Amino acid sequence: MSDKNMVVSVFNTHSEAEAAIRELQKAGFNMKQLSVVGKDYQTDEHVVGYYNTGDRVKYWGKLGAFWGGLWGFLFGSAFFFVPGIGPLVVGGPLVSWIVGALEGAAIVGGLNAFGAALYSLGIPKDSIVKYETSLKSDKFLLIAHGTLEETEKAKKILEAANCVEACLHSA
């Protein structure tokens, strides 16, 4: 994706994030331009998930139905352990950027792979710290990628969907 315009929104709960995703879908937003990041590692089983090259994720956890419902229309999905944040479930194009940061050793000045991926997309370090803090607090990030027009429209929808905050980052 050549456009590095995005709106990053923070939601307190998975149900709020899910409702926002449904609103974006109703408005015709391309679901392949949406990334979701959150923590979900409390489980009755020790296995929390895995990623394989067939783009299929098997996942067990308290929010399994939430994540399972997203995998069908998001582009890419993975489970990462990020030092300083913990286990993260990621869906959407952000998966490729995190993997790229890991493979290219593009870790930037004190940032982990998650932060380096966001930084490579043009998000300032102070915003990255804020997003990492939100994830540590068990909140969910929805990141809508696209043209400036698409991301401005997505920002309005996300703000109407009761997000904690929505910040537009343009290329």
Image (cartoon, helix red, strand yellow):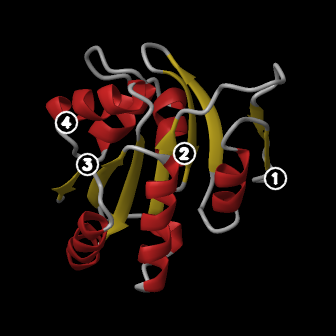
Whole-percent x, y for residue 4 in the image: 28, 59
Q: Alpha carbon of mark 1 to alpha carbon of mark 4: how far?
A: 33 Å
Of 20 and 145, the residue lying toward us: 20
Front: mark 4 or 2: 4
**Callout 2: helix, strand or loop?**
helix
Res. 164 mark: 3
Q: Considering only order in the chain, which callout, 1 or 3, is on the residue closer to the N terminus?
A: 1
Q: Residue at x 46, y 62 (%)?
A: 34
Residue 163, compared with residue 109, is above or below; it is below
Q: Would you name the residue on which mark 2 appears?
A: 95
User: Where is residue 60 shown, x and y percent of the image?
Assistant: 79, 37
Task: Name the N-terminal-most of marks 1 and 2.
Answer: 1
Task: Name the amino acid, label 4.
Answer: Ser
Mark 3 or 4: in front is 3
Q: Earlier in the sequence, mark 2 or mark 3?
A: 2
> According to the image, label 1 marks what residue?
54
Residue drawn at point x = 45 percent, y = 31 percent: 138
Nearer mark to the viewer, of 3 and 1:
3
Residue 106 appearing in the image: no
Q: How far is mark 4 from mark 2, CA to CA?
A: 19 Å
Classed neighbour count for the residue bearing mark 1: other residues with Cα under 10 Å, few (<14), some (14–19), many (≥20): few
x%, y% of residue 132? 34, 28
Label 3 and label 4: CA atoms lie apart by: 14 Å
Q: Amino acid at mark 1?
A: Gly
Point out the image quarter for the N terminus.
bottom left
Q: Earlier in the sequence, mark 1 or mark 4?
A: 1
Q: Is residue 31 above or below residue 127?
A: below
Q: Which residue is mark 4?
A: 127
Rendered image quadrant of residue 168: bottom left
Q: Residue type at mark 2?
A: Val
Q: Secondary structure at mark 4?
A: helix
